[in-house]
Image (cartoon, grey):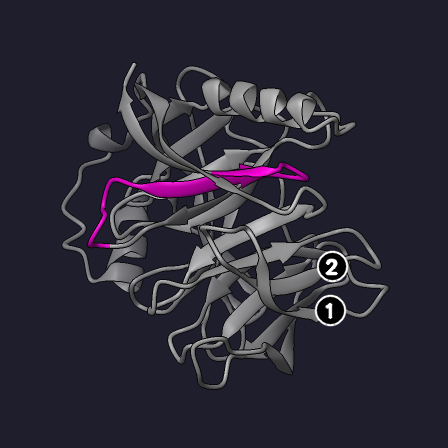
Amino acid sequence: MARVVFLVGSVIVSIGALLAALWLVFSGGDGGRSDAACEPEQPERLVAEVLEVHPHDPDAFTQGLLLDDSGRLWESTGLRGESEVRLLDVDSGDVLSSAALSPDLFGEGLTMADDGSLVQLTWTSGLALKWSLGSGETPVPERTGEFDYDGEGWGITTLDDGFYTMSDGSNRLQFRTPDDFSVAAMMEIERADGAADQLNELEWDGSTLWANRYQSDEILGIDLDCGVVESVVDASSVTAAATEAIESAGLQRDVQTRDVLNGIAWLGPEHPDSYYVTGKRWPTLYEITFAPA
């Protein structure tokens, strides 16, 4: 079963045999699954089916996507001197409002806090930036604070109880408290049929944690009850469509190593089976669903 540690003050306590307790803490679940039920098994094989194609800023080095409670699409972009948090118009691909990070910061994953503010990771600076959205149909992000953390920041999403789940490019997830961003627990993700490292952009849809694997066409569906990969989405058809769009637009991009699939946003309970996905410097944003392979 997955290895989990709770952090109590400065003491790290290994509790792999009590994994179900983690779900009790974070989601109010019944914790009734047995150790045997949490052994990694062959994951379900899925494919990404494209439902709609939308334009997207080809200069955006996408690191995170999310829909807020009003259905507006927000994006975090990376690279030092180019990083922003921005509000997008899905139909046109236009940037409706934006705020730039300091030139020394490299923007990464993006999520929404329970109070309606945004939390944006930075790659190696150890800062999670807080952004207030104010009011109005086209709010302009305003930086209002920050959290400190150790290590690299890659992806982040918010669970139903307000706790954050954060990735650092390994197979490890961190669970952080909403009040001070301290680490409450860590979980090592296991997979029966391959690697579960390079976990990048994250998205919680109320039942499954979805994770981009960096420099791959895989989107992993992770069962947080057990810390195992329960489904693997083959999104190579989306990458192929993006490659065609890149070539048609005459853009010079490296979709094999750098300008890869990244960014996933659940469309919410009104469209429970749909997600937006894009990639770094892709000229297209895709609405997809997951279908049996």
Judge whether residue 7 can be spotted in this image: no
Q: Could you tell me which quadrant the C terminus lies in?
A: top left
Q: Eyeballing the image, is 285 above or below 148?
A: above
| Left or right of 126 on screen, residue 92 | left
Q: Which mark is residue 198?
A: none
Task: Tell me which amino acid carries mark 2.
Answer: Ser
Q: Give the residue pinned by disc 2.
A: 83
- Helix, strand or loop at mark 2: loop
Residue at x 48%, y 62% (from the top left corner): 111
In the image, residue 220 lies in the stretch drawn in magenta: no
In the rendered view, would you say 19 is above or below 159? above
Residue 112 position, x and y percent, is 45, 67
- Tell me the amino acid under the disc marked 1: Ala
In the image, what residue occupies the spot 42% across and 31% down? 220
Quarter placement of the N terminus: top left
Asked which secondary structure carries label 1, the reply is strand
Magenta segment, which residues?
269-285
Calculate the distance from the C-alpha at mark 1 to the C-alpha at mark 2: 6 Å
Confirm whether the magenta stretch covers residue 279: yes
Residue 96 visible within the image:
yes
Q: Position of residue 226 (x, y in %)?
A: 31, 39
Q: Which mark is residue 100?
A: 1
Q: Residues within 10 Å of mark 2 (few under 14, many from 20)?
A: many
Tag 1 and tag 2, C-beta contact below 8 Å: yes
The spot of residue 278 in percent (x, y) is 53, 39
- The residue drawn where x is 32% and y is 55% is 22
